[in-house]
Image (cartoon, rainbow, N blue to C red):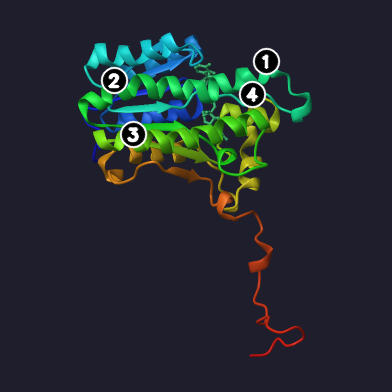
Amino acid sequence: MERRLEGQVAVITGGASGIGAATAQKLVAHGAKVVLGDIQEDRLAGFVKELGDSAVGRRCDVTREEEVKGLVEAAMDSHGRIDVMFNNAGIVGAIGPLDTTPTEEWKFTLDILLNGVFYGMKHASGHMKRARRGSIVSMSSTAGVMGGLGPHAYAAAKHGVVGLTKNLAAEMCAFGVRVNCLAPGLIATPLAAAATVGDPDGVEQALPVFAEQSPIPGRAGMPEDVANAVLWLASEESGYVNGQTIAIDAGLTTGSKPGAPNFAEYQPIMREAGNSGL
Ligand SMILES: NC(=O)c1ccc[n+]([C@@H]2O[C@H](COP(=O)([O-])OP(=O)(O)OC[C@H]3O[C@@H](n4cnc5c(N)ncnc54)[C@H](O)[C@@H]3O)[C@@H](O)[C@H]2O)c1
């Protein structure tokens, strides 16, 4: 297998589970060193052990700027470079009607999903500017590009990630650094299992639900689908792609949906009312 990130260094927040963990595995398989941060310290330690010499883990709560800075600095101290910053950590956060959303829950959700991304961008981008290279990838969602697909605070934060990505891309392009984000649909992870079947350990159990809700019949979105996009955005293969939000959603945000009844069978052409002939 061709190793597309040989010698590169990637920092990943929320690296102990789901999409972050799948991405760590993928990048390591392609020759990268990974520096992973998470608040699930035991889970992270076990996972880092599995990954072997190419990975280190460190507690990093993305709501704490000094811990995000510490994660980035750990990569610089160990490897002297940072090529990829993946701002991925997340939660579902505040749910329910806006008029009853507790302000504390709103702020907590934005703190993780938007401020956490800001801290990652802030502390990685300085190093990348000086090196005049790098790829910043952040986690948005289908709920960050369309209304009605997620809770209010989640949607607001994820839309914020899209906006910040575009703006930072406009600053960083002059330094040869690219900034993009991802908008996955439903992906089979503990977070999605918790939201779907009420149990973060119920990913296997939730797979038929994910497959049923997918626009592509029977094809659930998997963490590796997102990891593949990060690999591409990290590599020079995407070297002319900047400021973009890449949807990984089986077409959900472009109108594809399960069933597609309008296209089920041939119908005679429709023209003036009452005349279906050519
Ligand atoms: N799974 C989906 O359907 C889906 C869809 C679109 C976007 N996303 C986004 O993908 C990202 C990863 O989610 P996932 O589905 O892999 O979920 P996950 O729960 O499997 O992984 C999220 C990780 O983030 C960590 N985390 C939570 N709060 C943190 C904090 N304050 N500091 C550091 N780490 C923290 C968790 O401990 C966990 O390891 C999230 O930003 C999520 O919003 C997920």
Question: Which residue type does callout 2 highlight?
Answer: Ser
Q: Earlier in the sequence, mark 3 or mark 4?
A: 4
Residue 76: quarter of image: top left
Residue position marked by numbered label 2 in the rendering: 54
Camera-nearest label, 4 or 2: 4
Q: Position of residue 278 (x, y in %)?
A: 63, 90
Q: Is mark 4 within 8 Å of ligand 1?
A: no
Q: Is mark 3 in CB contact (under 8 Å) with mark 4? A: no
The Cα–Cα distance between marks 3 and 1, rounded to whole angstroms, is 32 Å
Q: Residue at x 24, y 27 (%)?
A: 8
Residue position marked by numbered label 1 in the rendering: 104
Q: Is residue 206 above or below residue 66?
A: below
Q: Earlier in the sequence, mark 2 or mark 3?
A: 2
In the structure shown, which secondary structural element does the residue marked by tag 1 occupy? helix
Q: Position of residue 92 (x, y in %)?
A: 62, 26
Q: Position of residue 190 (x, y in %)?
A: 58, 27
Question: Which residue type does callout 1 highlight?
Answer: Glu
In the structure shown, which secondary structural element does the residue marked by tag 4 occupy? loop
In the structure shown, which secondary structural element does the residue marked by tag 2 occupy? helix
Outermost bottom residue: 278
Left/right placement of residue 212 relative to residue 57 reads right
Residue position marked by numbered label 3 in the rendering: 171
Q: Residue at x 25, y 11 (%)?
A: 77
The Cα–Cα distance between marks 2 and 3, rounded to whole angstroms, is 31 Å
Between residue 195 and residue 244, name the one nearer to us: 244
In the structure shown, which secondary structural element does the residue marked by tag 3 occupy? helix
Q: Is residue 82 visible?
A: no
